[in-house]
Image (cartoon, grey):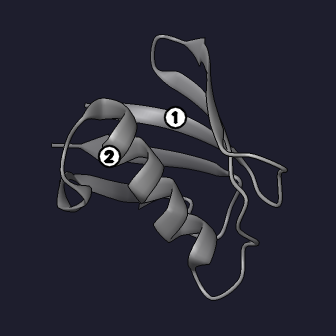
Amino acid sequence: MDIKITVVPCAKKCEIIELDAYHLKVKLISAPKKNKANKELIAILAKHFGIRKSAVFIKTGLRSKHKTIQIL
């Protein structure tokens, strides 16, 4: 399953906002430096969907606020 993600780094708290069935807005506390925000995003999505972190992949947008995530 592929999901489109809009990331908001450096937010005050972590939260997931559903914009559509396959589009989420995710607020992260981490800054987008040294891959910290991507790691936090994977951890939050794994917890949200109740799956392992290894089952969540960033398909496109490693350095962008707009990402496509693949969940196995």
Quadrant where the image shows the C terminus: top left
* 60 relative position to 7: left or right: left
Q: Residue beneath label 2, please?
A: 46
Q: Which amino acid does label 2 sit on?
A: Ala
Residue drawn at point x = 40 percent, y = 56 percent: 43
Vertical relation: 70 (above or below) 19: below
* 52 relative position to 9: left or right: left
| Marker disc for residue 4 | 1
Q: Residue 34 in the image: x percent, y percent? A: 63, 88
Residue drawn at point x = 75 percent, y = 46 percent: 13
Q: Residue 53 in the image: x percent, y percent? A: 26, 58
Residue drawn at point x = 56 percent, y = 49 percent: 67
Corner quadrant of residue 19: top right
* 31 relative position to 49: left or right: right
Residue drawn at point x = 57 percent, y = 28 percent: 24
Q: Residue 54 in the image: x percent, y percent? A: 19, 62
Do the residues bearing badges 2 and 1 touch, measured as CB atoms within 8 Å?
Answer: no
| Marker disc for residue 60 | none
Q: Please, which residue is most extreme toward the top here?
A: 21
Quadrant where the image shows the N terminus: top left
Q: What residue type is labelled 1?
A: Lys
Circle 1: is it few (<14), some (14-19), or many (20+) Cα within 10 Å? some
Vertical relation: 2 (above or below) 61: above
Which numbered disc flags the more N-terminal residue, 2 or 1? Answer: 1
Vertical relation: 35 (above or below) 53: below
Q: Nearer the viewer, residue 31 or 22?
A: 31
Vertical relation: 46 (above or below) 36: above
Per the model, the C-alpha gap separating discs 2 and 1 is 15 Å
As helix, strand or loop, the secondary structure at mark 2 comes to helix
Q: Nearer the viewer, mark 2 or mark 1?
A: 2
As helix, strand or loop, the secondary structure at mark 1 comes to strand
